[in-house]
Amino acid sequence: MTARAIAFDLTRLIVRLRHASPTGIDRVDLAYARHVLAGEGPRFGLVTSAFGPRVIDREQAHAVVEAVAAGWVEDVRAEDDPVYRRLVGGPSEQATPAGARRDALRRRRVQAGTALRTLRGRGIEALPPGTVYLHSAHLRLDLPGRFDWLYGRRDIRPVFFVHDLIPISHPEYGRPGESVRHARRMETIARHAAAVIVNSTDVGARFSEHLATRGFSAKPITVAPLGVEPVFSARDGAAPRFSRPTFLICGTIESRKNHLMLLQLWRDLAERHGAGTPHLVIVGRRGWEVENVIDLLERCTAIAPHVTEVAGLSTSGLARLMRGATALLMPSFIEGYGLPVVEAAASGLPVVASDIAVHREIGEAFAHLLDPLDGQGWRGAIEALSVPDSPLRISLAARLDGYRAPTWPDHLRTLDTAIAALDGP
């Protein structure tokens, strides 16, 4: 890690604590924060607010980060994760609305405490000349005024992480107005960035093209594939044993993830196979404008015995679940990266994924790729994988032999190299 001064933006970590479990971007933020604050040289946390940026020292920033991580209950064993225990049929306390409210209240208290701690911070004059400002999320970049302080500190070297351009390239999958907001985010980056980190070559190409079409100058871009947590490659603890083939789909339930196709397919499988229908586990919280998916989940009695929806599963719980499942299904229409694909491969879990650019980039060597609109192809793959000795199952398992997933140390070394290459003090 470079010894030059770095200020890491903690804003998203604090804001996102209202959710019970972190998203993929939240996990990136957490990994970056811990890496930066453990490095040599001056280290700071920074939070943007309507009152201007507030700077806190390393010790205070570290306390904020660990309070957020504890609020998410991420650092737990699978055996201690109540969501995982309920899913695999082990002993677990029954979830209750009152318990959920208590957990939410606890997170709110942590959030309020961390926010108060940052508001007591200092102004940007606390940052040494030549400090690197590292922003690893998209949060508040659509409010360009929150970053006007960078105009007054031209010595600061801003580095931004661009996760995707999906709201711009595929506005139909986002909330109304999100494409405009995301364009503002990219413009904020274009105006200030000394360097940009992306998670895939596909995202890098899309970002460069976006800047060019809007008349912005090109930015130095570093491709750093997202790391897989070591727990996915570990073999500690017994993998769950399921009574029937069990397939996973992971990620927030939203239209671009193509859950609707899978649920309609599961209805067809139920009609064909009855009690022998494989099990589908949907891992992820509900997103926006997915009423058709929710209707199927809540009202379709044909799939009810064969589909389970879970939210709040810990990373350790997901890793253990992957070790006992039959395959991961990722029929997305568009992704910025597709982290579950490489997490599954690291776990030894066969992958069936949509044939899109980023899935070819990260998983062509091991994944079975299908057009996201090819319902018959997906049904055939699921039925084939449900047979233990099928040629497809044997082939996909063999492709995973010797697979080495990208790691966080790999990613963070790439980040360090990009930061070290910046000009200035």
Image (cartoon, rainbow, N blue to C red):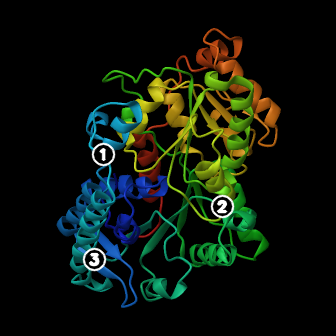
From what the image shows, is residue 339 above or below residue 170?
Answer: above
**Residue at 56% across, 24% down:** 326
Position of the C terminus by quadrant: bottom left
Of labels 3 and 2, the one closer to you: 2
Q: Amino acid at mark 2?
A: Glu
In the rendered structure, which amino acid carries the disc numbered 1?
A: Gln
Residue position marked by numbered label 3 in the rendering = 115
Q: Is residue 386 left or right of residue 264?
A: left
| Residue at the disc numbered 2 | 291
Q: Residues within 10 Å of mark 2 (few under 14, many from 20)?
A: some
Q: CA distance from mark 3 to mark 2?
A: 34 Å
Residue located beneath label 1 in the image: 94
- Amino acid type at circle 3 is Ala
Pick the residue in front: 241 or 211.
241
Residue 4, horizontal then vertical, whole percent: 32, 63
Query: Residue 203 versus residue 27: which sits nearer the camera?
Result: 27
Q: Is residue 40 visible?
A: no
Q: Earlier in the sequence, mark 1 or mark 3?
A: 1
